[in-house]
Amino acid sequence: MKDKLIFSIIIGMLAILIVWVIGVVLQNKEDGSGLVLVPVNLFYYSAEADTKNGNVKCSLDGIVPVERRLRIGKGASTEEKIQATIRELINGNLTESEIAEGIDTEFPLEGFSFVDTSLQNGLLTLYFEDTSNATTGGSCRTGILWLQIEQTALQFQEVDSVIFEPNTLFQP
């Protein structure tokens, strides 16, 4: 009797593993459009994770990842993957569960748009337009906006550091 129970548990666990593997394979399968689902992290803000002794620190401690799967061309370059990821970040689409967990963002910002990238020897330059000066404000706010984009870009192993153009962005 005990052996049958152990055998049933093992068979059940194997079935769950097989279903999971099939799901992963199907999620990453090309859909005929030449696109595949690529897992990335978007980094947003959690004041709760950034609080010490009741005070918000406006620090990297509050920058938290949320996972997304983006449809990106199968042979996409690193720059193309970065571009798709940054665009998704500044769209600011949080799920209801992420909002319930206290994750927040000010993206999208009116008049703020992503233009292009340049990646050379680990240095990633991100080019934006900010026609409404939406990236200005207090030092806490501008620092958090900066960190969200920077940390999202730094997840790519080819990126060692990030600079923003024009350099007038994210000024307090």
Image: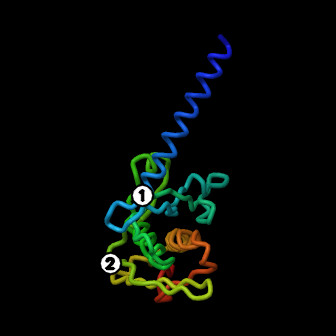
Identify the residue under disc 1: 29
Colouring used for the render: rainbow
- Which residue corresponds to the image point at 57% horizontal and 28% vertical from the top-left? 11
- Residue most toward the top? 1
Q: Closest to the observer: 86 or 28?
A: 28
- Is residue 166 shown above or below 92? below
Which residue: 49% across, 60% down? 39
Report helix, strand or loop for mark 2: loop
Q: Quadrant of the N terminus?
A: top right
Q: Earlier in the sequence, mark 2 or mark 1?
A: 1
**Any part of residue 112 in sight:** yes
- Residue 68: give x, y in percent of width and height: 46, 58
Residue at x 45% of width, y 46% of height: 100
Residue 84 drawn at (x, y percent) = 42, 72
Q: Determine which quarter of the picture holds residue 140.
A: bottom right
In this picture, is 24 found above or below 42? Answer: above
From the top left corner, tell me how far across and down residue 172 is, in percent: 51, 79
Q: Amino acid at mark 2?
A: Gly
Q: How far across and down, in percent of the image, does residue 144 sit?
A: 53, 68
112 lies above or below 166: above
Q: Eyeballing the image, is 100 above or below 153?
A: above
Q: Nearer the viewer, residue 46 or 92?
A: 92
Q: State the CA–CA distance, disc 2 to disc 1.
A: 36 Å
Q: Amino acid at mark 1?
A: Lys
Q: Are marks 2 and 1 in contact (CB under 8 Å)?
A: no
User: Nearest the camera: 123 or 171?
Assistant: 123
Residue matched to label 2 = 111
Quadrant hosting residue 64 = bottom right
Q: Residues within 10 Å of mark 2 (few under 14, many from 20)?
A: few
Q: Alpha-carbon neighbours of circle 1 within 10 Å: few (<14), some, or many (≥20)?
A: some
Q: Nearer the viewer, mark 2 or mark 1?
A: 1
Residue at image coords 65%, 21%: 6
